[in-house]
Image: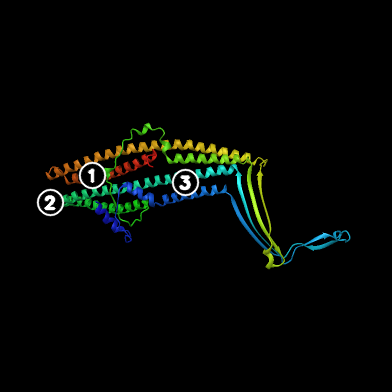
């Protein structure tokens, strides 16, 4: 079967395979590969790295802030100032133009300041760390979604392989029956219409197998896409349908706090924490801020550019600056009220999320139970259809049955096979959805 699948895939490959390595993967291997190569998870990892830098950026606000400055001026026209004439013995009301300053001026300085206390900075620092936690949980959510997508795609390939196996079995036994019927027709034992009936069934099965082979090739490509693997890479699945256990779910009803294992609930909790931190930040606006400042400047002045830097006029200072908020038209009060409402809304959303997750789990539970019962019923129906076909063939060979009865039994078996395949796929997919609903996929 794997050989047939490989032939189908080779036929549909449009590029030369650039990787000669053979990937013989189990479900877990495919998931692990996706964790390393799927774009959504790679981007989630980058988001975590970005959040780490955001924490460092916020931390840097509380470190000393140092800046340098430099300036140079060439006064093409030195500014003129008018001084009262009586300063120079002139009549009152007159002014004497005087130029102060020199043609060339330059300065170099360095300034530093340090936060000593700022409530909003302390809250912002904690918020940046919570933001990093949010990025980590978003990565977990991406991994869960990728896990689900890869698992479902893997199961789809396995089910398509099983469908191909059943089709091949039906084609082989129908080919044998058709050859026998043709010989009987040549001997005059059966009519031409009997040959035509079975030929129609045989041709339909051949077409179904060709369609299934094409679908199987596409399903392999879908799986590789979900994994983040180039679709032209060779991939062989190691797990079989028999390796998959459809678990009993009797113990799931006893877990009443399963929703806490859901990443959606965890993300909602982180959202509340961020809203609470924003409320603290708004309240911190009522607190004073205190900063330390220091500055040193070297000034140079001269009418000759060549002598400009021969004489230095330095200045420096250190000091504290205190900012005490007193009244801002109740803006801070209303901002605090808005943040309080945001916290209440996020808490309501969390409660609604919990109820929604419980409902989702109940739906997944019912769907899974129904899927198992349907699958078991389809297995029994398929076994019965095989037995009916076997008995119909014996009766036909013994001359007590008709070819129409055999053809009808063959059609019933094909229908049972199709329903069994659909039931198998539905049961496997509902199992994945159930595991996700109860937070069992990490």
The residues bearing labels 3 and 2 have C-alpha atoms spaced at a distance of 73 Å
Location of residue 97 (image quadrant): bottom right
Going by the image, does 404 lie left or right of 244?
A: left
Q: Of discs 2 and 1, which sits in the foreground?
A: 1
Sequence-first disc among 1 and 3: 3
Location of residue 369 (image quadrant): top left
The residue at which mark 3 appears reads as 135
The residue at which mark 2 appears reads as 184
Up/down of 256 relative to 112, above or below: above
Which sits in the foreground, 97 or 12? 97
Which sits in the foreground, 393 or 98? 98
Q: Of discs 3 and 2, which sits in the foreground?
A: 3
Q: State the residue at coordinates (51%, 36%).
A: 348
Q: State the residue at coordinates (28%, 56%).
A: 8
User: Residue 205 placed where, x, y %?
Assistant: 24, 51
Q: What element carries label 2?
A: helix
The residues bearing labels 1 and 3 have C-alpha atoms spaced at a distance of 52 Å
Quarter that holds the C terminus: top left
User: Residue 82 placed where, x, y %?
Assistant: 81, 61
Up/down of 62 relative to 350, above or below: below
Q: State the residue at coordinates (64%, 57%).
A: 109
Up/down of 209 relative to 437, above or below: below
The residues bearing labels 2 and 1 have C-alpha atoms spaced at a distance of 24 Å
The residue at which mark 1 appears reads as 413
Category of crowding for the residue at label 3, using alpha-carbon neighbours closer than 10 angstroms: few (below 14), some (14–19), many (at least 20): many
């Amino acid at each position: 079967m794997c050989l047939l699948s490989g032939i189908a895939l080779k036929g549909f490959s449009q590029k030369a395979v650039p990787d000669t390595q053979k990937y013989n993967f189990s479900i877990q291997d495919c998931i692990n590969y996706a964790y390393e190569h799927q774009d959504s998870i790679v981007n989630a990892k980058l988001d975590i790295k970005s959040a780490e830098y955001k924490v460092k950026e916020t931390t840097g606000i509380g470190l000393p802030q140092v800046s340098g400055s430099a300036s140079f001026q060439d006064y093409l026209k030195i500014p003129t100032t008018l001084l009262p004439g009586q300063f120079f013995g002139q009549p009152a009301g007159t002014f004497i133009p005087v130029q102060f300053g020199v043609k060339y001026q330059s300065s170099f300085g360095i300034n530093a300041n340090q936060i000593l206390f700022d409530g909003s900075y302390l809250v912002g620092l904690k918020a940046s760390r919570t933001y990093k936690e949010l990025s980590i949980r978003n990565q977990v959510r991406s991994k869960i979604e990728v896990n689900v997508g890869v698992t479902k795609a893997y199961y789809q390939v396995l089910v398509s392989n099983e469908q191909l196996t059943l089709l091949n079995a039906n084609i082989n036994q129908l080919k044998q029956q058709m050859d026998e019927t043709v010989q009987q027709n040549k001997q005059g034992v059966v009519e031409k219409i009997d040959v035509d009936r079975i030929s129609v069934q045989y041709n339909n099965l051949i077409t179904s197998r060709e369609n299934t082979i094409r679908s199987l090739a596409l399903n392999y490509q879908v799986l590789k896409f979900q994994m983040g693997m180039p679709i032209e890479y060779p991939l062989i699945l190691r797990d079989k349908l028999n390796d998959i256990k459809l678990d009993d779910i009797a113990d799931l009803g006893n877990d009443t706090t399963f929703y806490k294992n859901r990443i959606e609930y965890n993300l909602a909790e982180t959202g509340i924490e961020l809203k609470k931190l924003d409320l603290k930040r708004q309240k911190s606006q009522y607190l004073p801020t205190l900063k330390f400042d220091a500055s040193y400047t070297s000034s140079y002045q001269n009418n000759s550019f060549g002598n400009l830097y021969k004489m230095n006029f330095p200045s420096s200072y250190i000091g504290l600056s205190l900012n005490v908020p007193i009244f801002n038209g109740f803006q801070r009060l209303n901002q605090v009220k808005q943040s309080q409402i945001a916290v209440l809304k996020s808490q309501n959303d969390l409660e609604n999320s919990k109820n929604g997750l419980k409902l989702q789990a109940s739906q997944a539970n019912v769907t899974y139970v129904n899927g198992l019962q349907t699958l078991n019923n389809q297995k029994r129906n398929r076994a019965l259809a095989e037995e009916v076909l076997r008995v119909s063939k014996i009766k036909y060979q013994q001359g007590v049955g008709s070819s129409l009865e055999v053809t009808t039994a063959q059609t019933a078996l094909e229908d049972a096979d199709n329903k069994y395949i659909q039931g198998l796929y539905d049961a496997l997919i509902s199992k994945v959805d159930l595991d996700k609903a109860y937070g069992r996929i990490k």
